[in-house]
Amino acid sequence: MCPFTLSTVSEHSTILVAVHGPDGPGISAGLMSVLADAGVEVYDVEQIVVRGRLTLNVLIGVSGERATIRDLLFFGWERGLNVEFEKVDDTPTPTRPMSVVTVIGMAVGPDDFGAVAAAIADAGGNIDRIFRLSRYPVVSYELLVSNGNLDQMRENLVRAAAERPIDIAIQRDGLERRGKRMVIMDVDSTLIQEEVINLLAREAGAEEHCAELTYLTLNGEIDFEEALRERVALLKGLDQTAITRVHENITLTSGARTFIRTLKRLGMVTAIVSAGFTRFTDVLAADLGIDYSLSNTLEMKDGLLTGQLAGELVDGARKAAFLRSIAEAEGIPLSQVVAVGDGANDLDMLATAGLGIAFNAKPVVKQRADTAISVPYLDAILFTMGIRRQHVEEADAEDPTFEVGRRIEVPGTPPI
């Protein structure tokens, strides 16, 4: 604060009042009572508490009444608070473009914060506010940023994230960011930790060859349909017993249940879409209460897999079309859809959604998605949506028996 004396109060002054000190009940009420008694105008208020220490800023208009300043100083003295004043320009602050930067990591240190702050500043942005979203299973912070070139800022932040063990997401702040209504995600290596087709190939004694094809496919290095049909052919002759063993080896990604449960509490539509197989995705959808599901169907005759697919192929284009069909059926603008995936066949879907997230994804996907998350917790996606871990835990504690699930069919797609 700049030096301030009672003599600086003119006929009409705009003053920033800054209150610092130990927090406690009634401080904000008491301060406002002093201001109300003085008949001043309140233009803006901002308050934050960190570790029991209060910072409360109030922008007021004073009309030559020096007693207002004396009353505020006395209020601070009574409460053990430091009250400072700064006379500021009375020109209204112009509306500024705002962005939200989310920083996620197993730990976020001062060097990480420094790199993020430098990336923002180099693009002309200014950090107006920082607050913590979570302490575990990951540490995450949300930064409210004013001004700056969004594209340049994104480029700088991507570079900063690549150099450090943190994930950084940037989004334009606004109603659409806060109004997400649908989440659609890939299954293999996203909702679950495994690639189901590789597990099936293990049962057929062809895991090594299948895994190589899967790797090349997910990295966009070979034709998707050709590689999928070649891998499915390796499964010829597998019976239900082998399929059951694969079921028993599927593991949900850490945080998956928390993620879906929280989305459903928020009233969001949920969907999974996979180049994998209905015999597995249908079970997952029913177990988690997911609204929509679409995947490929393995053909079976006489109790054995034929090595072929039945029905229309689910590839990258079909995934994007499935997203659009759900959004249309639900009356949800594409800008309010979040898509999550890891492989090259998810790129169309990620590009179609308002927010496309690369989750522990292949390099080609990280480069083209809106943002990338590399921590092994699916519920970390909640933090990019501005949801605090504290609120998730409070909801679980208040309603531990919360159940999810509804079934709505999209015309032209199989019911789950």
Image (cartoon, grey):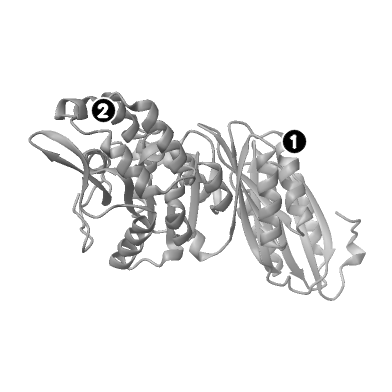
Q: Does any portion of residue 31 appear in the rendered image?
A: no
User: In the rendered image, which quarter is residue 399 located in?
Assistant: top left
Check the image and report above or below for 155 versus 89: above
- Residue 375: x and y, percent? 53, 35
Q: List the residue tagged with mark 1.
A: 111
Kind of residue at badge 1: Asp
Kind of residue at badge 2: Val
Check the image and report above or below for 230 versus 44: above
The residue lying at 23 percent from left, 24 percent from top is 245
* 3D distance between C-alphas at marks 2 and 1: 44 Å
Quarter holding the N terminus is bottom right
Q: List the residue tagged with mark 2.
A: 246
> Mark 2 falls on what kind of element?
helix
Q: Does any portion of residue 273 appear in the rendered image?
A: yes
Which callout, 2 or 1, points to the residue nearer the camera? Answer: 2
Judge the density around disc 1: few (<14), some (14-19), many (≥20) Cα neighbours within 10 Å.
few
In the image shown, does 191 or 2 lie closer to the viewer?
191
User: In the rendered image, which quarter is residue 163 located in?
Assistant: top right
Judged left or right of residue 91, residue 229 is left
In the image shown, does 295 or 97 lie closer to the viewer?
295
Judged left or right of residue 311, residue 338 is right
Find residue 34 and name its label. none
The residue lying at 55 percent from left, 53 percent from top is 368
In the image shown, does 230 or 74 lie closer to the viewer?
230
